[in-house]
Image (cartoon, rainbow, N blue to C red):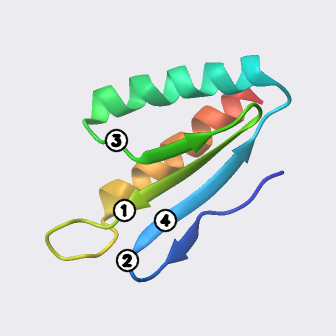
Amino acid sequence: MATEWQERNRPNRLEKRYEFANYDALRDFLDAAADLSERENYYPDMGFGRDYVNITIHADDTDKSILPAQREFAGALDQLRGAAA
């Protein structure tokens, strides 16, 4: 199921759900996402179950808007998901 990032208000954030065929595929994605977070020093909120993960990227604390770097991070997660498919 391919979906776009949803932009939400109050508070401003990006949200997306990724679904996987099984736990092993989910785990591979989570490991790759953890590596990306370490490299970028950015840690979105993630909640997951057996075959899905919900990711929330919150707006910048300073000006309360979604920054270009956060949108790039979202795109990098999409690329990871594509590689894990």
Q: Residue 42 placed where, x, y %?
A: 29, 42
Picture layout, residue 69 above or below residue 29: below
Q: How far apart are marks 2 and 1 (CA)?
A: 8 Å
Callout 3 crowding tier (Cα within 10 Å): few <14, some 14–19, many ≥20: some
Callout 2 crowding tier (Cα within 10 Å): few <14, some 14–19, many ≥20: few
Residues at circles 2 and 1 in contact by the CB criterion of under 8 Å:
yes
The amino acid marked with disc number 4 is Leu
Q: Residue 35 placed where, x, y %?
A: 41, 22
Picture layout, residue 30 above or below residue 81: above
Q: Which residue is drawn at 52% across and 20% down?
A: 31
Q: How far apart are marks 3 and 1 (CA)?
A: 10 Å
Disc 2 on helix, strand or loop? loop
The amino acid marked with disc number 3 is Tyr
Residue that badge 4 annotates: 14
Disc 1 on helix, strand or loop? strand
Q: Distance between the residues labelled 3 and 4?
A: 13 Å
Q: Residue 45 placed where, x, y %?
A: 43, 48
The amino acid marked with disc number 2 is Pro
Residue 29 appears left or right of 46: right
Image quadrant in which you'd find residue 16:
bottom right
Residue that badge 3 annotates: 43
Residue that badge 2 annotates: 11
Residue that badge 1 annotates: 58
State the residue in front, 50 or 68: 50
Give the residue at the far bottom of this rendering. 10
